[in-house]
Amino acid sequence: GGFITAIGIGIGWYGWSNNMHLTFLSYWGFMCLIDGAFGLVRLIDMQVHSPYNFYESGKGAHTYNVIQTFRLLIPLSQLLGAVMAYVVFKRSQEPEQRRLNTYSDDAP
């Protein structure tokens, strides 16, 4: 989990630092999709086999709840990163004039 995530972060940073290099941003998005999907499946599997609720109340539950929140938010943020990479890719494939008209105020 952590090593693959670190590789994905490195690829995303490289794409961002090279003037939003589309190839590396696409690689980053694909890695986010795969790692996020596996993370979500891992979370569901752990929860199905756990004797505890997803969130607990009582003494010592605060730490458990914080950990559970991170276990949920990390795969969700990776899946959102995959969606963002897809949107960047799709916008880059639009004709130049259409992109300019989309963002101008005087477009018909």
Image (cartoon, grey):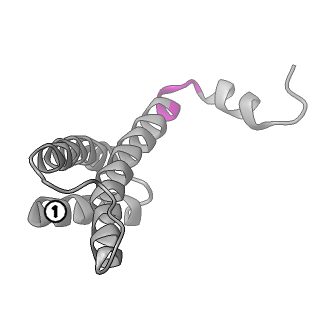
- Type of the residue with mark 1: Ile
What residue sits 87% from the left and 36% below the top?
105
The quadrant holding residue 73 is: bottom left
CA neighbours of label 1 inside 10 A, class few (<14), some (14 to 19), many (20+): few
| Quarter placement of the N terminus | bottom left
The residue at the far front in this view is 58
The residue at the far top in this view is 108
* Element assignment for label 1: helix
Q: Nearer the viewer, residue 11 or 39?
A: 39
What residue sits 46% from the left and 29% below the top?
90
Horizontal side of 13 relative to 93 (left or right) equals left
Horizontal side of 84 relative to 14 (left or right) equals right
Residue 58 location (% of width, % of height): 34, 73
For residue 34: magenta?
A: no
Q: Considering only vertical position in the picture, is 2 above or below 87?
A: below
For label 1, the residue is 7
Magenta segment's dominant SS is helix
The quadrant holding residue 34 is: top left
Residue 70 location (% of width, % of height): 32, 64
What residue sits 34% from the left and 57% below the top?
15
What residue sits 75% from the left and 28% below the top?
101
Q: Nearer the viewer, residue 8 or 70?
A: 70
Q: Considering only vertical position in the picture, is 67 above or below 97?
A: below
Residue 67 location (% of width, % of height): 28, 69
Q: Considering only vertical position in the picture, is 93 above or below 65?
A: above
Horizontal side of 66 relative to 90 (left or right) equals left
Q: Considering only vertical position in the picture, is 33 above or below 16?
A: above
Region of the chain picked out in magenta, as a range = 91-95
Q: How many marks?
A: 1
Residue 44 location (% of width, % of height): 19, 43
